[in-house]
Each structure stands twice: as C-alpha cells, then as structure tokens.
Image (spheres, grey):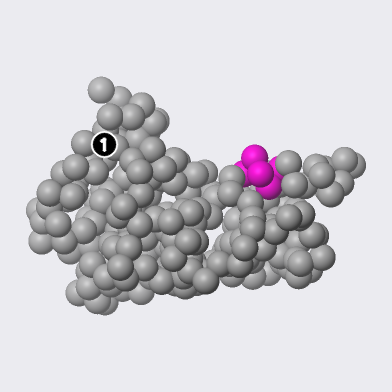
Amino acid sequence: MDYTSKIRVLVLDDNPVLIDGLNFLINSTRQLHAIILPQRNQKLCEAIEKLEPDVIVADPNFLDGLLSECGLQMQDLRVRTKLIAYCDARETQSGETYINRGYSGVVTKTVASPRLLRAIKSVHAGDVVIDETVLALSDRPSRPCAIDQRKLSMKEEFVLRHVALGKAMKEIAADIQLSAKTVETYKYRAIKKLDLRTRSDIVNYAISVGWLQH
C-alpha cells in the first residue's frame, strides 16, 4: 500500500497499550498512517530523523523526558514536525501554556476518537487546535453573545486576517518578522477571544467584518 500521500503520525506515550490503540485508530482512516518506533527505547532524535513524522501526538510529560535524554529543546523538534499535546485531564494546563511551549494542538486523553483525528488533520493543515475539553478545564469566560472585533490587538487582527486569506504560519511570520511560534500564539489568542473553532469559522468571521470583500 502506498503511504506517501498520507499524514504520517507518531504517538509517544509511556503506555504501550494506549500507543497500540491509537495506532490502530489512526490506521483505520484513509488520510492518516501511524508510524512506529522500531525500538521502544530508541532515542527520539534518531527516530525523528529516520521516520520523518508529519505530526507527533505526545504526552507532554513523556515527551519532556525524551527531549531531556536527547539534549533537545522543543524548538528543535517543532521545526521538523507538528506537535499535539495529548494530556492527562487531571494534569492539563491552559491551552495557551502548551501553545507557548511549541505545541500546535492540545487535547485530553478523554477526548472522543473523531475529535482527536480531526485535530491531527487540522494541525497538519496549519491550524492551532485547542479542544473544548481543554478550554473547559481553564478559567474560560462565558461565551459572548456577539463577536466584537475591537477585542483583538493589531497583531492578532493582522494574523487572523492572513489566516483567513489562506496564508501559512511561516508566511505570516515572515511578513511581520516574528517567529512562527509567536504568530501561532497571536492566532490562538484571537480565536479564543472570538470563540472560533475551525478554519471555516475564521473565514466566516472575516467575511462578516469585511476582510474578504476586497
């Protein structure tokens, strides 16, 4: 079977049963392909270089330990792949905490399977994904009755405008001479303020405020 067109996903966790279950789930889809470490104790840097995953779904605490063993930093890893924090609900921090660390997505281990699969696809496409279960665990303000564009800072608005236009994070970062990580943080803050979830939500919002009419 040809896997070259599929999104390559590597699951990292200290529970081998969970890894096997997620790999089975991932391989049950048409768009995703689970890649497996040849050896459970293989160093992360060696595995990344050999397997070239598009997305890594990792328990944050477990990943921190692997990075420490390799002498790597999060920024070393995130330039090669997209990262999703797959968190224990009892230990989950705010979504922004994980985004600032370098993750592009955050879900808890209690999330429904379809949501996890959607998160993998969305993160691979360049979106920042914070699952509702993570937002619920944070001190999230109540849902606003109406969207208010004035809530956005100038940089948040700039980033969201260009996301709506289809620009990638790296392109936006180059335009305003900031790191892609910083741009992702601005995007996350903007979508959280406006209570947006998906790329379609962002485009619809952009249309509603006139960003895409010219």
Nearer the observer, 44 or 100: 100
Q: Is residue 104 visible?
A: no
Residue at image x 25%, y 23%?
Answer: 1
How many numbered circles are shown?
1
Quadrant housing residue 190: bottom right
What percent of the width, then of the height, locates residue 202? 68, 47
The magenta stretch is: 199-203
Q: Name the residue under label 1.
A: 25
- Assign the C terminus to one quadrant of the image: top right
What percent of the width, then of the height, locates residue 34? 26, 40
Residue at image x 86%, y 46%?
Answer: 210
Residue at image x 28%, y 49%?
Answer: 10
Dot 1 falls on a residue whose secondary structure is helix
Few, some or many residues within 10 Å of mark 1 (<14, 14–19, 20+): some
Give the main secondary structure, helix, strand or loop, of the magenta stretch. Answer: helix
Residue 67 belongs to magenta span: no
Q: Is residue 104 above or below residue 17?
A: below
Residue at image x 19%, y 49%?
Answer: 19
Q: Is residue 107 visible?
A: yes
Q: What residue type is labelled 1?
A: Leu
Q: Is residue 14 above or below residue 21?
A: below
